[in-house]
Image: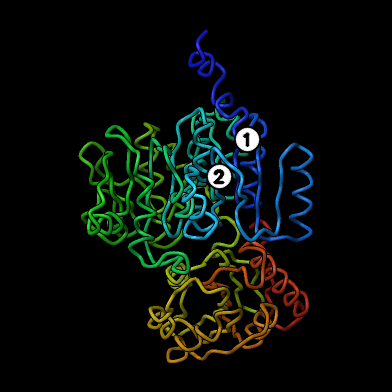
Amino acid sequence: MSEEVRMEAEGPMSQWKHRRVLVLGLGSSGIAATELLLRAGARVVVADRANNPGLETQAQALRGRGAEVILGGTQAPDDAFDLCVVSPGVPCAGLWVTGLRQRGVPIIGELELGYQFSLCPSIAVTGTNGKTTTTELIERILSHTNRKAVAAGNIGLPLCQIVEKSKELDMLTLEVSSFQLETIQFFRPTVAILLNITPDHLDRYPSMVEYTRAKARIFMNQQSFDWAIIQKEALIQLQVLGIEVNSKIITFSANDPSADITLDRGLLISRLPDWAGPLMDMDQAKLRGPHNAENLMAALVAGRVMRLPLAEVAAALQSYTPARHRCELVAEVGGVKFVNDSKATNVDAVQKALLMIQRLPADKPNIWLIAGGRDKGFSFHELGPYLAQRVKGALLIGETREKIRAAWSLFTPCTMMNSLLEAVNEAARLAQPGDVVLLSPACSSFDMFQNYQHRGEVFREAVQAWAAAHAGAPGDAARQDEKK
């Protein structure tokens, strides 16, 4: 048996035996990549600039399995490596990665590594906002129609962690970020979805041009028989930059009536010649707002190109309940609603949240907005008109609070807070029946919290403490929504 035939018979694992691989970053992606490489017989070195008790615990576990782990280093190891696998949080423009490239070390990301091991087709979803919701929607329609599917990637489950099970699956549903797309090589989804492109991660990208080009890499390896499902506005952005998409394109938009799939008075309508007519009524879904209409459109089209029955796809989408931290109603106390939108880590997401909140009959502002965190390079000024129309006051926390106040103070009263708990209590004290206390930060969470989920849970706990303390107030209609 020739070496080529033997490797083909043994599968992707055999190709990694005895290869010396450097993994940069000891987060969940780095750990998953390291464990997969060790199972494949590679000799793995893991390096992370940080050094703390949590990382040391992870390092000891990996050392016990045969990996060499370096914590707290100031530069990449000088050893010779066949390959470097980069975690998404490690910037490609940083000194570690650029130094390795100068030494001729090939660089790929954890997503690419997992893809090279995968044994089933994939659907990939990217975009500034809506990635997680749309990925979950597609996983739901696949499961509802008796297809075996797993949602992985940027959604929280690294692809490398589950890729060995892919031979048992009909489809992998992958949420992919711009960071992950920077380091792909052969990654080629059968169906690639681009939801939208609005300003984000401008602390990592020099301009929107570079950010847009990173998002467009999702189509880089697609062939003419693959599918690209693209928001019409995002497709125009790609065309302005001269970026070509070689696969079959279907467009959607809640605002552009020339798109293939559009929103018209609550109906999702197709203009495709072989699939024309109404597809779904938004009133029958639990998701609300034009942005969620686009998420549903993308999922409907994904079902179409996979030849799934429309009735079954629509039924699956209608039963979907939004996940935590996405405009999630946590409680209602004394006629005041408390909404957790911790996932809103950019300005566009906050705008969508403000538009989703039901207004008072008198059309007056009724939102107390809690915002702030670590700066991602936004100007924040574009929210001004929405603040003036919808927000009674902003309570600002975190590293970016001064910058946000400078941008927002002309449009709504801004108050500086020292913590999220303090902001919740102050907003609850100021709010009147019919008001909404909304956590929608427009920033990342890493200045004060582990991640956006941690920030959302701290908000939830603060609201529940307030509700418990005021449960006996006259006219109180305290209601905890633990199911969400």
Quick one: label 2, few (<14), some, or many (20+) residues within 10 Å?
A: many
The image shows residue 236, relative to residue 8, as above or below, that is: below
| Nearer-N-terminus badge (1/2) | 1
Of the residues shown, which amino acid type is indicated by label 2?
A: Val
Viewer-closest of 116 and 176 = 116
Which residue occupies 78% across, 44% down? 61
The image shows residue 94, relative to residue 400, as above or below, that is: above
Q: Secondary structure at mark 1?
A: helix
Residue position for label 2: 85
Viewer-closest of 46 and 80 = 80
Which residue occupies 35% across, 58% down? 212
Left or right of residue 400: residue 216: left
Residue position for label 1: 37
Mark 1 touching mark 2, by CB under 8 A? yes
The image shows residue 401, relative to residue 289, as above or below, that is: below
Quarter of the image with the C terminus is bottom right
Quick one: label 1, few (<14), some, or many (20+) residues within 10 Å?
A: many
Q: Position of residue 418 (x, y in %)?
A: 67, 84
Q: How is the image coloured?
A: rainbow
Marks 1 and 2, how far apart at CA: 10 Å
The image shows residue 171, relative to residue 289, as above or below, that is: above
Viewer-closest of 374 and 81 = 81
Q: Position of residue 365 (x, y in %)?
A: 47, 84
Of the residues shown, which amino acid type is indicated by label 1?
A: Leu
Q: Position of residue 4 (x, y in %)?
A: 48, 16
